[in-house]
Structure formats: C-alpha cells, structure tokens
Image: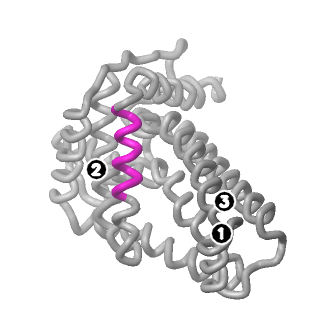
C-alpha cells in the first residue's frame, strides 16, 4: 500500500483530473502572474535564484580542474533538466500567495511537510537519472567524434568545436540529442511537480496528467518550452547572473500555468 500511495496517491483509486485547453494568452498571463509573485518578495527569490549561477560557476571550476571541458556545456544546459524539482520552493511560495497565506522563505520549506513528499522524491530521482543519462550521451558523442584524448585547454577545445567538421557535427547532433531530453522532461514534469505539491495524487498520476496536458495543448506547450529555453539562455549570458531573476519568474509562472491547465 505504501508503494501504491507513492505512485497513485492516498486514495484507494487513482484520481485523474481533467485537462483544459489553453492558448497564447494563458502563457502570457502565467508569465505576468509569475513576475508579480517574484516582485512580491524579490529578495527571497533572487537569493534562491543565485543557486543556479553559483552552481554554474562551480561546474565550470570542476570541469576545469578535471580537464573535462567537453562536459561544461552539457552540465550547464542539462542543469535545467532538474530545474522543475529545484523550483519546488517557488511553487510553494506561489501557492501560498494565491491562498493568502504567509509566503516568506521559511514558509517555502513547507514543501518538506507535504504528504506527497515521497512521490516528489521519486519524481526527483527520475529527473536526476535523466540528467545523468544526458551527460553520458554527451560524453559518448564527444568521444565518438574526437576520440578519448581530452582537449589541452578550454580555448583549444573551443577552436576544435568551431573550426572542424567534427566540431559542427558535435554542435548539431548534441543539441538535437539535448532537445529530445528536454522534450521528455517537459512532457513528464511541466505540471507534475506543482500538481504533487497541490494534491497528494501520486507520481504516476502526476506524470500521466503532465503528458496529457502536453498532448492536449501541443502548440502552447511547445511555445512554453521555447519561452523557458529563451529565458534561460538570456539569463545565462551575463555570466549566469541573470538566472537569479529568470529562474524564479519561470518557477512562479509554472505554478500559474499548472493552475490554468489542470482542473
């Protein structure tokens, strides 16, 4: 019964909610509401958002020391794959603001008291498995094109990537593979984590609901994926510092998107 509770929730039979059709106006409204939540307590959220640029810098230092520059881009870009799990405190803040409850940083830790925490943990482990598989695929692709010899330095690696046929193959093929991982993550988690925070429905029900939401709204969900990707790219340009704003706004907006899609 414990396993069933994690997968399907606390009820005897799984409850699958209905899905609404949404449009571009819903995406813009979700972003607007996410921005509003961000400005309600920007100091808390900017602090949380700094986790992302700091992690990016640490990843850069780690890859430099280990002489594994080819993994730097997959690490930084693939970190977005676990973003839906890392944004759980932001969902909780938006949920509390919506309900008129206190919404401080300490209140956001209410996620740890959620009855759906085991299901959230299972889905989080799934995301980390996808992240690991993405890194493994990126490493295998690089070795297939350049062999097992690591680049002498960052600049020699950049030169090989930008000036050789193998390098352009790596850019195109690597981004296509990354797109597949991104689509899978979007389809399975776009509303799954907010839904688990909102109701103890179980990981299986949350993932299936997320997939149904994408199938029912293919164009809006594709646009949402592009919006998220574009915001993360723009936030990454000034040494990842812009992510301190982009990530919280996207996290809050995801909560409001969930509320618009799932009945």
Disc 3: CA contacts within 10 A as few (<14), some (14-19) or many (>=20): some
The residue shown at (34%, 64%) is 234
Main secondary structure of the magenta stretch: helix
Q: Are marks 3 and 2 in contact (CB under 8 Å)?
A: no
Earlier along the polypeptide chain: callout 2 or callout 1? 1
Left-right relation of 70 to 34: right
| x, y percent for residue 73 | 57, 67
Q: Residue furthest top?
A: 13
Label 3 vs 1, first from the N-terminus: 1
User: What residue lies at 70% left-to-right and 51% top-to-bottom?
Assistant: 133
Say left or right for 125 vs 219: right
What label does residue 93 carry, if any?
2
Residue 158 lies in the magenta stretch: no
Query: Which circle marks residue 169 in the picture?
Result: 3
Q: Find out whether the residues at labels 2 and 1 contact each other: C-beta distance under 8 Å.
A: no
Secondary structure, mark 1, is helix
Taking 72 as reference, is 235 left or right? left
Question: Which of 149 and 161 lies nearest the eye of the viewer?
Answer: 161
Q: Is residue 9 visible?
A: no
> Residue reaching furthest right?
148
> Distance of mark 3 from mark 1, alpha carbons?
16 Å
Percent position of residue 117, x then y? 51, 41
Between residues 90 and 145, which one lies in front from this camera angle? 145
């Amino acid at each position: 019964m414990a396993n069933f509770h994690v997968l399907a929730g606390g009820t005897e039979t799984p409850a699958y909610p209905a899905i609404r059709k949404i449009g571009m106006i819903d995406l813009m409204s979700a972003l607007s509401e996410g921005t509003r939540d961000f400005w309600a307590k920007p100091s808390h959220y900017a602090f949380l958002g700094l986790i992302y640029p700091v992690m990016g810098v640490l990843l850069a230092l780690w890859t430099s020391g280990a002489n594994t520059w080819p993994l730097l881009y997959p690490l930084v870009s693939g970190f977005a794959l676990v973003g839906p799990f890392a944004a759980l405190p932001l969902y909780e803040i938006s949920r509390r603001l919506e309900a008129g409850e206190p919404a401080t940083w300490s209140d956001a830790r209410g996620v740890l008291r959620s009855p759906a925490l085991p299901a959230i943990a299972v889905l989080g482990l799934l995301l980390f498995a996808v992240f690991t598989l993405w890194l493994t695929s990126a490493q295998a692709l690089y070795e297939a094109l350049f062999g097992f010899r690591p680049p002498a330095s960052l600049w020699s690696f950049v030169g090989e990537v930008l000036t050789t046929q193998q390098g352009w193959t790596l850019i195109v093929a690597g981004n296509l593979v990354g797109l597949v991982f991104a689509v899978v993550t979007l389809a399975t988690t776009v509303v799954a984590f907010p839904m688990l925070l909102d109701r103890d429905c179980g990981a299986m029900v949350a993932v299936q609901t997320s997939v149904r939401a994408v199938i029912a709204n293919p164009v809006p969900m594709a646009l949402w994926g592009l919006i998220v990707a574009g915001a993360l790219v723009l936030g990454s340009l000034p040494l990842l510092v812009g992510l301190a704003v982009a990530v919280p706004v996207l996290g809050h907006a995801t909560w409001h998107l969930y509320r618009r899609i799932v009945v």
